[in-house]
Amino acid sequence: MRWNKADLPHKGWTEIGMEDLGEGLEGEEIEYEQCEMCGNEKIRYVHIMKHPEVHGELHVGCICASKMTDDYVNPEARENNLRNRSNRRKNFMKQRWNVHPRSGNYVLRYKGENITIMRSKFGSGWGVIFQGETRWKYHEKKIYDLDTAKLVAFNLFDELHGSANEVQPYWNQGRWIYR
């Protein structure tokens, strides 16, 4: 536990992002992290902290992030946004898609909007279309299965729909980071 270390600053930290360790793990077990400040062992929503006097970053829970930034509103609000996004994703992934009889495309009418998933004409692979945006890749790799295409559809919908005001992720060094 680092709260006990005299040489580690307790204040003046900046939250540089958050990570949801459950992102994309539908049905799989989550590998929780341990808070690097207090030792709490079951952190799903990791607050990534940086300090000008400390090399590297610390991964902490919501309460420690609040204390370290001296901000008792925003870390909790950001974590609530991530929880809400996770619930939206779960709801989205349960939706029933219709298969268009002629094209074979998967179509979903969701919150008044149409989302289309289609197979590539050029071999294996899937694409997602929503509001004129098309995505053929996920994590810089081709989309090879329908479940991944549905996840891409959720991310695209969440980014472009009315929930765009919510926190949006970006891919960084093999993980989704939220600001």
Image (spheres, rainbow, N blue to C red):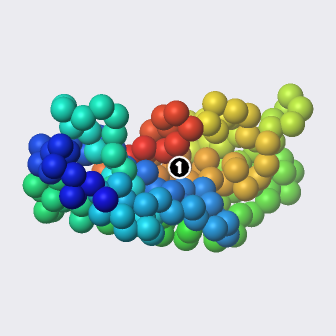
**Foreground residue, 11 or 24?**
11
Amino acid on which the number 1 mark rests in the picture:
Asn
**Foreground residue, 131 or 158?**
158
Using a 10 Å C-alpha cutoff, classify the residue at mark 1 as few (fewer than 14 neighbours), some (14 to 19) or many (20 or more).
Answer: some
Most distant residue in the right direction: 123
Q: Residue at x 73, y 56 (%)?
A: 147
From the top left corner, tell me how far across and down residue 54 is, in percent. 24, 35
Left or right: 99 as drawn, with respect to 133: right
Left or right: 56 as drawn, with respect to 115: left
Q: Residue at x 50, y 37 (%)?
A: 171
Which residue is label 1 attached to?
155
Left or right: 133 as drawn, with respect to 96: left
From the top left corner, tell me how far across and down residue 80 is, in percent. 32, 66
**Foreground residue, 91 or 10?**
10
Q: Could you tell me if residue 17 is visible in this image?
A: yes
Q: Could you tell me if residue 62 is visible in this image?
A: no
